[in-house]
Amino acid sequence: MEPISGRFRLGNRSAETKLAGEVSAPIVCSANGATLALRGSVRLGDRPISSADAAGSILEAYAQSGNAFLSELRGPFALVIHLPQADKALIAIDRMGIERLTWAQQNDLLAIGTSAEDVVSRLPGRPQLDPQAIFNFVLGHMVPSPKTVFKGVRKLEPGGAIEFNGTRAREFRHWQPTFERSGSENIATLRDSVLPALLRAIQLEQPDAKSGSFLSGGLDSSTVTGLLTQANEASANAFSVGFGVAEYDEMEFADAASERFGCRHFKYEVTADDIVDAIPKIATTYDEPFGNSSAVPTYFCARLAKDHGVTHLFAGDGGDEIFGGNERYVRQRIFEVYSRIPSILRNLLLEPVADALDPETSLLPLRKFSSYVRQARIPLPERFESWNLIYREGAERIFAREFLDEIDPQGPLHRMADVWNSCPSADLLDRMLWYDWKYTLADNDIRKVSTMSELAGVRVAYPMLEEDFVELSIQVPSKEKISGHELRTFFKNAVRDFLPAKIIEKQKHGFGLPFGLWLKTHKELQELVYGSLDSLKSRGVCNPEFLERVVSEHRDGHASYYGYAIWDLVMLEQWFQHHISPGSI
């Protein structure tokens, strides 16, 4: 879909209002001196907003109840309402951040767009890169909202809105979950509601013969694929990618789901040559550096769908983050036990002993004890990054001295803590899910899937993130979502008679990419990667010694672990090459 774009001069009633498009414009309508631009498959209550006439009801709701009307909107949306006579504007995005809006204000000029680069193009002067955002990317594999890679340009956060009055921007949340549970939930009733509620979420997206699904073979994609078959009352089009590398490949599970539901199953095997082809495409497509390597298989899966005439894909993203499916949720519960040990015992005995031990000792019990204490004493959410090479190395060893002088190395950790502490629940799992709704979903996975699908010419829907389905998940107590060390107990029980047993019982793989493995042997990939890292040395961002060392460690050590860091650094340099003029950084 075509981005929303706008350039308003608040405080000048005669100024031009521009909401233009190049390919397929967003819905635009005007009434009673107000203009609305709207993108997404949005509903006002149960009423789909699919035309300018229907969109007029949003302006009516806004005129009647002001910003409170936002609570009535359902589905993914990005909207802009401009009232030039009142020198006023409102921008907002949906609850889970499926759609995007970026914005900047310079004096009385307000620029709005779905792309940071689009906003920059509407501002006077030369755009300036934000060193802090670049640092945040290297640590977190993406630029977390509300920052963008450009100074002064910001992203709306999930469920966020901004009201402008000509001189001031007031940010607020138009939705926030309560995580309130009565304590008397009927778990059986909730469990029986899962499949019907998810089916309704799929039906709301109006699937047809040109619809299909991403099918990885995991719980969520398999469930969505099966329900898509029911919604269409016909065999679903299902699309899968493999890698030919056992520890990364889930094709046997995708085949099991396809066989169960009688799908038309289309498959593609991603190769190292595909990565070489995709890296420049990915770097060009994103408006700021983006380092999730599974963008590669996502793109080839979406392109496979487009090649077979499918232009509307259903994704299973979100299930792990609403029902407790990430392995770190169990790990962090184990680490949190440490905080319940009396502080005098921790401070005077356990921590001194752990600090005195060699972390690499050959005695396994002592090594595990030392590792446990060292990680457990790091507070959440910072502990989430304790595996991260960039976090472990420390900013001083990775970045150039002049670059460090321009940034706050603790900045992203402080922001993570702010998000963590903003959760309206004290429950540990609720907090982890809340945190991941922003950092794992809105800032990362949704951007990955949506952007790569658009690059392939396909629109994507996320039924797991439909409002009623998310609300259903919130009603499930944490102890039901994860039972002991078993992830997603509640959801597995809800789909146990629907999915093949091997999918429910399988170990979680994720949707990774064997980039680090292939980099050890594939000549063209090595040329692209090492050439990119050599170019990055001249940018003044990273220490050249670190870039050389991480390549050496990858060659001699853990291919996948060091491959993650190398991928991010390569994507940073590739983004510079495709977006920033020579000499800018």
Image (tube, rainbow, N blue to C red):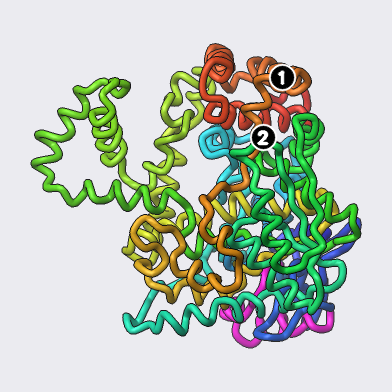
Q: Quadrant of residue 58?
A: bottom right
Secondary structure under tag 1 reads helix
Q: Residue at x 87, y 71 (%)?
A: 209
Q: Is residue 316 above or below residue 370?
A: below
Question: What segment is highlighted magenta in the picture?
Answer: 52-79
Q: Is residue 518 above or below residue 139?
A: above
Q: Residue at x 83, y 55 (%)?
A: 305
Q: Quadrant of residue 100?
A: bottom right
Overall secondary structure of the magenta section = helix
- Tag 1 residue: 526
Q: Does the rendering let one see residue 477?
A: yes
Q: Amino acid at mark 1?
A: Gln
Q: Residue at x 22, y 46 (%)?
A: 338
Comparing 233 with 47, the one in front is 233
Assess whether residue 64 is covered by the magenta stretch: yes
Q: Is residue 420 above or below residue 492?
A: above
Residue 153 at x, y = what percent?
A: 64, 47
Residue 551 at x, y = what percent?
A: 59, 17
- Tag 2 residue: 128
Q: Amino acid at mark 2?
A: Gln
Kindly report which numbered mark, 2 or 1, lies closer to the viewer in this rendering: 1
In the rendered view of the protein, which quadrant contains the C terminus?
top right
